[in-house]
Amino acid sequence: MKTFAQLGIPFPLFEAPISETSDYLGISQCEICEQREQHCFRLNNGDHVVVRCPQCQTENGLRANCPGTFACQSCASSLTLPGRSKREGVRICFSCLREGKGAIGKDTEFGAVWWENALLGHTHGVPGLKAAGFETVILDPEENWAGVRLSQEKLFELLRTPSFSTWQGEIWLFCCKSPMTYIGEWQSVSASLEEEESRKLFGQLTAEIEEFPNWDWESVSNPDGGVSLYAFQCKQCGHYRANYDMD
Ligand SMILES: [Zn+2]
Ligand SMILES: [Zn+2]
Ligand SMILES: [Zn+2]
């Protein structure tokens, strides 16, 4: 199972096999820089194309699934979403994505992270947020709605990373004041491990899952078991965490 690193286009926060994202389109023409034969990704619902205003140089995040013309948020000059096949979103090459010309929105344990959240330096938040070890920001006291403050650099890195495929929607995890690295679904993570190692990693991944149903290593390792375990590793402290869903 090939990874992006093996293709020569590594993502620090995505080490899983390429087959675990539906954002990757293969070799195509970038609709932003118009270079042909590039590794391309799809920007769509929840994603943004970042367009620099030619008049005032302000960066504007345009919603990738909303074709049309927009007013610059700073000087109101007219800006147009690039791309032709707009109903299917916008194709962006690896270089443009890594340079921040696009932003792939994420759902996380601390609420959504879209382009505007990275600019603000905090997640969109959730009601009744639990985030031990993180600096929180109260966003709506009446709803008990809070987000987590994170550096812009780390939030932009998350947006320059593909999303991973799930049954019910991805939820990205954090550790050490940073997004963790997605290392893959359990079937691929455990594929190359001996049983002893696999059982140990399973224990580490599931140790912190609250209300983890009564599943053990055997049931989750069964490819027909209908359970998917999404595994993350913190590249700063080495810690493992995971979340799960069902088909
Ligand atoms: Zn490009
Ligand atoms: Zn402008
Ligand atoms: Zn950590």
Image (tube, rainbow, N blue to C red):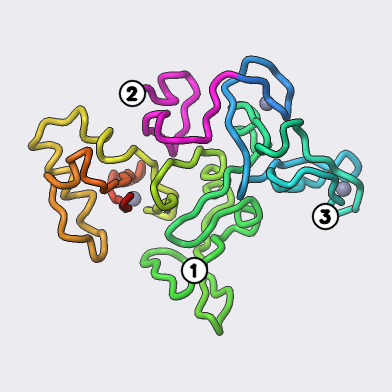
The secondary element bearing badge 2 is classed as loop
* Residue located farthest toward the bottom when viewing the structure as drawn: 142
Task: Nearest to the eye among marks 3 and 2: give it.
Answer: 2
- Which residue is found at the position 62% from the left and 20% from the top? 28
Q: Are marks 1 and 3 in contact (CB under 8 Å)?
A: no
- Which residue is found at the position 56% from the left and 44% from the top? 159
Classify 176 as above or below 111: above
Tell whether 225 sits left or right of 118.
left
- Which residue is found at the position 36% from the left and 41% from the top? 235
User: Residue 117: where, in percent of width, then height?
Assistant: 61, 57
The secondary element bearing badge 3 is classed as loop
Mark 1 vs 3, N-terminal side = 3
Disc 3 designates what residue?
A: 73
Q: Amino acid at mark 1?
A: Val
In magenta, the rendered stretch is: 1-27
The circle on residue 126 is: 1
